[in-house]
Image (cartoon, rainbow, N blue to C red):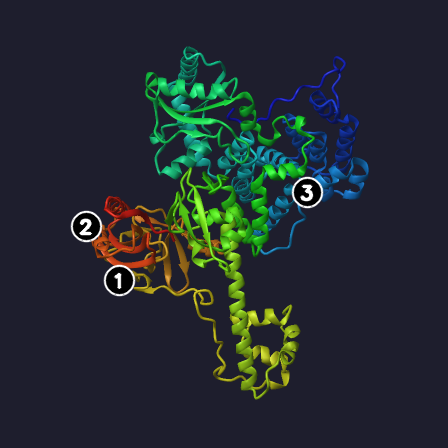
Amino acid sequence: MAGGSPPPARAPEGLAAGTVPSPGVALARIVGAYDPRADLPLIEAAYALAEKAHAPQKRENGEPYIVHPLAVAEILAGYRLDQGSIITALLHDVVEDTPIGLPEIEKKFGREVARLVDGVTKLTRLELQSERTKQAENLRKLVLAMSEDIRVLLVKLADRLHNMRTLAAVPKPEKRRKTARETLEIYAPLAERIGMDALKTEIETLAFREIDADAWATIAARLTFLRGQGADLIEAIEADVKRVLGDAGVTVLDVIGREKSPYSIWLKMQKKNVAFEQLSDIMAFRVIVADKADCYAALGAIHSAYRVVPGRFKDYISTPKTNGYQSLHTGVTVPERRNAKIEVQIRTREMHEVAEFGVAAHWIYKQGDTAAKDRKRFTWVRDLLEILDAANDPQDFLDHTKLELHRDQVFCFTPKGDLIELPRGATPVDFAYQVHSQVGDACVGAKVNGKIVPLRHQLENGDQIEIITARGGTPNPQWERFVATGKARARIRRFVHAQQRSEHQDAGRAAIAKAVRAEGLDYSEKLIEPAVKALKQPDFATLCVAVGAGNLSAREVVHAAVPELKGPPRAVDTLPLARPRGRLGAGPALMQPGKGEKSSSARRDSAMGISGLVAGMAVHFAGCCHPLPGDRIVGIVTTGRGVTIHKNDCHSLESFSATPERFIDVDWEYDAAPRGVHVGRIEVVTEGSTGSNALAGVTTAIAKQEGAVTSLKITNRAAEYCELLVDVEVRDLKHLGTIIAALRACPGVTGVERARS
């Protein structure tokens, strides 16, 4: 099932001919049809209360407001949820939008419903710094609420689904786009995490159509065209698969063919950087069989009958996803049907219902489950709670949570055989933090499959990882550059912030003491205490941090503490702030020509032109990510320095997220200028502690591919391996790829990757 519709709810029964029940009665009878234990009068009473409370209100399309909570309740009834969820859906906006409060709801409908309503209720508009901060605060509350009861999330998702279905009625385009972006970034991944694939697909499609209508229309038109070319192709492949399985003696309950959704097709086009015509698997077929043994029998029959696409097989039955999803995935080519490449998913009926409807599947039969059992099942909720605890501010929490939600999977094992799920691109540091936060903090090394590897090594499915720890170990701030999980990044950033605060506090206290002595006074904290209140700081430690960070001057603090010292302004402040030194205390270094980036004048003759700039604007290329022709790029405007060009996935861009007006759309002018020289950065890992032979092999391979080494640095050396950071002059991204391929073929080289920012 590709669409987002829930299982069809049964129509009300037992009505007299010609009688039309009230919406509340009809909803109660739908619930009663699948749940004989439901208190139908209580559901009717909840509808009556919501209808009366919302009576004066209208939706933006002019409909009575009660239409929305009723629609949310009907969506959940379609999923056969319990009466508490249905009543919560009816009342979820009552507390915020009407005079009725939680005590009245608790009195009429019980403590459980009141708790659920409190968890789902939209927050009163917060007086915060930005819309993104408000979004982060809303997500924080949602995570806390769903950690207590997953039904909070189910009601919230149904609420968002109905809002997306009626999004066209919102008059302001910017408000529609904001809602659509939030849906793609937060709610679709949450739906995927609890296995509600049908709902996820529908809200993704609706959001994609709003955010990028042109792309949606183009893909939809291409799908329509392909349907016209092969109107019977899906039906023919369905019949062919049934025949193959029947000949093999496999009992087949159903074969369902479908096109992938426009949004999933668009994502694959972006990820693989290919055109629509180059995609090979826009069709997927779900084979439903009787039991688990038949799943593997069906897989064998399909692999025997069709040519297998390498690298596409995944066994989620023996290793289920964390949301409970189980299925066998494989990719095959059907030569009899125009060499169509298709994806085949093989599962039982129960697995199929869990895949489509996730935690909502058969909910009515699981009402004895406790919230504690739900928390054990949904371990990712625990991870979000740990991120919530580690994040320093709402924006950090929002960014790290998105990392945690948007991820492909890699399954790795501890030395004892315990399974750990991680995102694609995860490293041993991510693994260590997934085991336990303290293990991550104390991590100093790692063995993968018995072999010591660098901590930036990317893990693969089936790897066995042993983490080497040291007592008293602390996170390395450099880890933040390569970790892949939000949990690890939040913990590392928390440590960095704590250490920066400590350094700023020490530097600030020293600067204040120096300023006091310069005025001929003896320094003491008691002398400075009046400045805390005068400068509106919460305590003396925070005052010192403000001075150490440069937000306050030491003289300003002394004059606030001892006002009689104020005199005519001096021409020069003789007490400059002694800013902390070191990698954590130092502020961001300015990029100077020859240190991190070349000036535009130095590179103008060699660099390919950039389109999208104002004539005469200075251009710099970022030294953090080394963009090359062929990379997707973005420009950052800096006052007095022109535009700095970054790769559009550069981690440094996070620091500019609060000033989106500084971003400009740019691209390479491939035909405007001759191809010149650009610097690409690569990371090379060799066996053993690299000697002259290995270094000679690396430089020779680069030279043979017409590259030139401009810088080579050994960043990490151990008995088993050595890590090198090499800057190479290349023409473009393709040239760098050729050099990387040549280095991978060098003896003694165990890994080569383009350096990440």
Secondary structure type for disc 2: loop
Secondary element under disc 1, as helix, strand or loop, is helix
In the rendered structure, which amino acid carries the disc numbered 2? Glu
Question: Label 2: few (<14), some or many (≥20) within 10 Å?
Answer: some
Kindly identify which residue carries mark 3. 119
**Quarter location, residue 562:** bottom right
Front-lying residue, 510 or 748? 748
Q: Regarding mark 3 in the picture, which secondary structure is present there? A: helix
Task: Tell me which residue sits at (30%, 60%) in the image.
Answer: 600
Q: Nearer the viewer, residue 535 or 317?
A: 317
Instruction: Name which of mark 1 and mark 3 comes first in the sequence.
Output: 3
Residue 444, by quadrant, is bottom left
Residue shown at the point (64%, 70%) measured from the top left = 539
Q: Residues within 10 Å of mark 3 (few under 14, many from 20)?
A: many
- Badge 1 amino acid: Ala
- Residue 161 position in % (x across, y down): 59, 34
Residue 546, position as x, y percentages in the image:
56, 70
Q: Disc 2 marks which residue?
A: 706
Camera sees residue 654: yes
Does 329 sit left or right of 724 as displayed? right
Q: Nearer the viewer, residue 369 or 665?
A: 369
**Residue located beneath label 1 in the image:** 602
